[in-house]
Image (cartoon, rainbow, N blue to C red):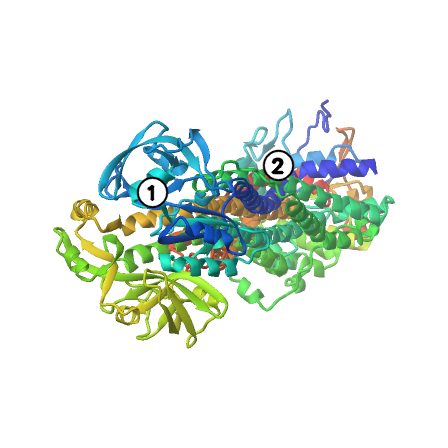
Amino acid sequence: MLVEALRGIDFDLAPGELVVLLGPSGSGKSTLLNILGGLDVPTTGHLEYGGQDLSHPSEEVLTRYRREHIGFIFQFYNLIPSLTAAENVALVADLADQPMQPGEALDLVGLASRRDHYPSQMSGGEQQRVAIARAVVKKPQILLCDEPTGALDAATGRLVLEVLDRVNRDLGTSIAVVTHNAPIARMADRVVSLADGRIATDAPNADRRAPSEVTW
Amino acid sequence: MRTLRKKLLRDLWRLRYQCLTIAMVVGCGIASFVAAVSSAASVKVSRDAFYADARFADVFAHLERAPRALLDRIRELPGVATVEGRVVGDFRLMLDSDSEPVVAHFVSIGLSPEGRLNETRILAGRQVEPGSADEILLSATFAETWGIQPGAHVNVVIDGRLAKLQVVGIAMSPEFVSATAPRTGLPDPWHFGIAWMDEGALARAAGLVGAFNDVAIQLAVGADEQQTIARIDSLLEPYGGLGAIGRSDQSSSKLVDQKIGQLERMARSLPLVFLGVAAFLLHVLLSRIVGAQREQIATLKALGYRTRELASHFLQFAVVISAAGVALGWALGDVAARAILTQYAYYFRLPTYYFRFDVRAVFGASVVALAAGVAGTFSAVRNAVSVPPAEAMRPEAPARYRASRLDATFALFRPVARMVIRDALRRPWRLLLSSLSIAFATAVVLAGTVMSDSIDEVLRLEFEVSHAEAITVTLDDSRPWRAVFAAAHLPGVRYAEGERQVPVRLHASHRARTTAILGQSHGGDLHHVLDRDRRPLWLPPEGLALSRPLGDSLGVRAGDEVEVEVLELDRRHLRVRVAALVDDFLGVAAYMDAHELARLLGESPRANVILLSVDAADVDAVTARLMALPRVAAVTRPSVDRGLVWAEEGDVFVVLQLVLAVFASAIAVGVVYNNARIALELRSRDLATMRILGFTRGELAFVLLSEQAIQVVIGVIAGLPLGRALGGLTLRTIDQELLRIPVSVTSSSYVGGASVVLLAALASAVVVRRQSDRLDLVAVLKARD
């Protein structure tokens, strides 16, 4: 039996835009994010990045796409436990042509002082900020975040959102955040909500707020 | 609990390749044990059945000549039950031999009042007709080697006359289960066989009518063998008796005993080493499999399962794998034991080989293997089931790494390399144990080559370095030294040296050993007895030098005196000081300076062995000339003898070597495949993250497999000296009186041993690499473990 995770989706992500994708469990938001990030390929339909057709890509093309253009933020951070903060960042910097300095990326997330700490020596919020530094160090055009605050308390979550906000404003990186936490939508340029594999609403947010004003 | 059993089955199926590789290692350990124990038991039971059935004698004595009336006096000795006087003699057969003479040892078939001893079993054809003058039986190995069928005729030279005899049957006898040529003490069916002939006919041919020159005796129940032998000796001494021997010194029986002993020693040593390795592997691998399921265990506990139920669940895991290994081991061992028996059956002619599966020993080993499996899992299961259920509810904490002083050094490496190094160093025990497993695998495969290398080296030393002559001539008796000069003047001979070998029995307190004293002349070029450092043996100018095992078995040390009983016509008894125990490596012997020996024997220099230096092109011609000479008993070549020893000892080791290589590959695959597979499972999250971050499959494989590569490299390097040691240990299973082999390894064996393990590791790595390529990125990120 074929289960359709997404149907009739028509979605664009503009340069410099911060989009929040809302929806309950099973609405298809993670699948959409996976397709955007080149982790998954749609059964039918058309995917394009900057004029390049990614509908039926080879493994090599997908790897290069992720390597050159996409930054990922995971719900559970997914830092490599055997590498320090700076090394986790450097791990990705090594892959890029013109990356930032790992120190610079850590500075951006306010963790320059923890550069030599291992993941096990940091709090969840700190680990997530290192993950953001790791994602932005290669200066990706797109940052995809899967429940970035899902495992964090509200105060720590806000710190992480502030970093994302800064990355979006200062570096001009397009960001797509998947969350079931509706208040986060207030910091977005545009809010897309999904239900049953379809886009239910897709509307610009006229009143984009700073993360510090977001509460839940 | 039924669901838990389903989980067990599913887990076993999911981890089937890992389980299979572990079961293979257990199986190989059990198999080697089963094979050695069962083949030893089978040879033993088959031999005992034949000995009893065919009435194998207990004591044997050879003499010059005695009237048959003497047999009645022997029969009256206390301790003697049955006596059979016989006529024996070695006669040359005129077969189409390449160049060396073919000799048959003729034994008479007579009628003893008490019934025959050492009965022949007819395999083909019929028994010799009593009173027939021209019928013979031939020993099976010899007849098969030469393709002689019943009905064929052979020409024999008896007392200088050619006789045409008909082979009427092919036979075997408990006396010649292994027909060893007298000079080399080794089975040599191309040059030596046994023939049985009617007693009257053989006595007439050998000029022994009304007389006998050999006697076989069955002892009464409870008789003391040594005392009876002494009584027989004193009775036979006036008739040129050469000293009676018990069964344990009878050449065929001795060789069979030595082989059984070797198998038994092998059963006690090698498989135990292997089982130890298997238990150790089982421990390492099962701990990791259970360790990887910590979170599942916590979840099951949160769901209400008892600690005891979970512990039993995981112990069943170990039991199933070990039991599969044991079953595999039984099957493989049974096949291997039958293969060993088939090989032995060529040299050891027994009418029936009873296959004896030594159930008790095998059952014992199986229990040991199961216990090892359970013990190996026990600590891991105990740790795992003590996980608090709440752990399953929390996000996984990152593994702990701390700053270390080595971090500055690591800065030289790229982060990916740092990951590998830190992971390896974070669990030094795991690294150590894995490397040790690989080291064992390397050692096991190398042990097999060490054995054949060492035997090869000993044979090279004995037959190329120690014996530099092209031809060895054995005379029918000791002859005055001028025989050596005569040999030196034969056309084609460049140079000749004589040696005097005197059969003796050495006595020290209550112990006695039958051996020979080799008179060595200083300044000889063709024969140097070597010591274990490969240098010519140093011989003291006075007194006897004894091979160390000979001295040990007599309980004498340098400085002690032994009584030398000369087993020649002139039966002297002399007291001689043992000047040294020497470390030669082939057989046991006593050595003495040739002049000193001649002085002791009160004779002018004599020789019974002549060594000849001959141009390779002339060897055949010289051999032919020698064979025509009347006093020549045997003409042999060291190069041919080398092949005989190799056939006798080497073949078994070649098989063993192959088995060990398979076994080692099983270990290497077991270790590398399991380690890499577990690493893949434990690190799938890290690896998937890296894939998403943009790393290629190749870069991931580097991370996954370089840790395995480190283990393999460390293991292989450590395994080389370990293998040399293990090989040395295995060599000790050879009867020490037969061969004392200095361990020697060629560099190509080191390369070969390392290559087997590296290839097995590489193959496992390729398989795991394929599996890592199929990593499901999305699924990995959804699940937390």
Both marks 1 and 2 on one chain: no
Q: In the image, which is nearer the foreground, mark 1 or mark 2?
A: 1
Q: Quadrant of residue B496?
A: bottom left
Vertical placement of residue A42 versus B83, above or below? above
User: Is residue B734 at least partly visible in the picture?
Assistant: no
- Label 2: which secondary element: loop
Q: Which residue is mark 2?
A: A38
Contact between marks 1 and 2 (CB within 8 A): the answer is no
> Looking at the picture, how far across and down is residue B185, in whole percent?
38, 51
- Nearest to the observer: residue B741 or residue B313: B741
Question: Which chain is mark 1 on?
Answer: B
Question: Which chain is mark 2 on?
Answer: A
Say left or right for B175 vs A107. left
Say left or right for B408 vs A120. left
Name the residue type under label 1: Ala
> Looking at the picture, how far across and down is residue B346, in whole percent?
44, 39
Res. B100 mark:
none
Measuring 15% from the left and 59% from the top, which residue is drawn there? B485
Measuring 46% from the left and 50% from the top, which residue is drawn there? B72
Outermost residue to the top: A1
- Label 1: which secondary element: helix
- Nearest to the observer: residue B633 or residue A45: B633
Name the residue type under label 2: Gly
> Looking at the picture, how far across and down is residue B352, in whole percent?
52, 36
Which quarter of the rendering shows the N terminus of chain B? top right
Q: Which residue is mark 1?
A: B203
